[in-house]
Amino acid sequence: MSDNLQPRGSDDTSFAQPLYTPIKRRSFFMYAGATAGASALVLAGCSKDSNNATPSLPAGNSVTSSGAISLGSGDVGVLNFAYALEQLEADFYSKVAALPQGILTGSEYAYFQEVAKHEAIHRDFFKAALTRDASGQVLRGLTPKYPAATFTDRTNILATAKAFEDLGVAAYNGAGKLIKTPAYLVIAGQIVSVEARHAAYIRELVTPGSFAADDIVNATSGLDDQKSPTDVIVIAQNFITEKLDASTVGK
């Protein structure tokens, strides 16, 4: 995290309230559980009242010399990086959840509806955290794009979900080491555990027995795959209209 995001004592409930309230209004009772608990934890653990480092993302999301939107540097960059991915996942799952029944099985349809709620919470959390702690540096709302046949049949839907979930897990694994503020590292660890559950379920639907296959879990180390923010953005860029620059994330 950048120097302007510092840990705060967990007893400061008044600080947590402004960010916690929007999530609570929309979904707390519906989505109560690990995700809501994680939101409360990170909100109680971080503050903006410190050294106020120079903002690293151009105000208003102006672009770099290459024409890309910079995600920023330090912890702000990591948060914007995660926010970009969560925007994409939330959009995808919301579109699947809104499809007519019959394309997916009943249990699959229920799964996508539930995960759509998880991803919406993740997206809203990052936006609220950035708005509170790095006002003026919040990544703009992105415009997802998909191949024409993405939502037409079960095979394409599951293939896209698998790609997004595997990429999301690798992205959190790769970005974790770049986070400087302990409280945000805690929440990243909790979110990636949820994403890993999503990934395992989708992989089982696509290919039974592949939830921890060698293409994502190293057979020697037993550890999951990880990717750098720049490598992740190259892949995610295929589904995002705006051009993004992750070269300074975490630096």
Image: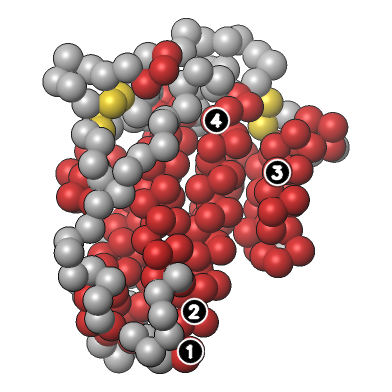
Q: Residues within 10 Å of mark 3 (few under 14, many from 20)?
A: some
Question: Measuring 40% from the left and 56% from the top, which residue is drawn there?
Answer: 91
Circle 1 sits on which residue?
107
Q: Residues within 10 Å of mark 2 (few under 14, many from 20)?
A: some
Mark 2 belongs to which amino acid? Answer: Tyr
Measure how far apart labels 1 and 3 are at the Cα level: 30 Å
Q: Secondary structure at mark 3?
A: helix
Circles 3 and 2: CB atoms closer than 8 Å = no
Residue 130 disc label: 4
Circle 2 sits on which residue?
111
Circle 3 sits on which residue?
22
Tell me, yes or no, if residue 36 can be seen here.
yes
Give the mark nearer the N terminus: 4 vs 2: 2
Circles 1 and 2: CB atoms closer than 8 Å = yes
Mark 3 belongs to which amino acid? Answer: Pro
Query: x and y percent of residue 95 in the render?
Result: 40, 65
Measure how far apart labels 1 and 4 are at the Cα level: 35 Å
Q: Residues within 10 Å of mark 1 (few under 14, many from 20)?
A: few
Q: Nearer the viewer, residue 19 or 232?
A: 19
Q: Secondary structure at mark 4?
A: helix
Question: Measuring 49% from the left and 79% from the top, which residue is drawn there?
Answer: 111
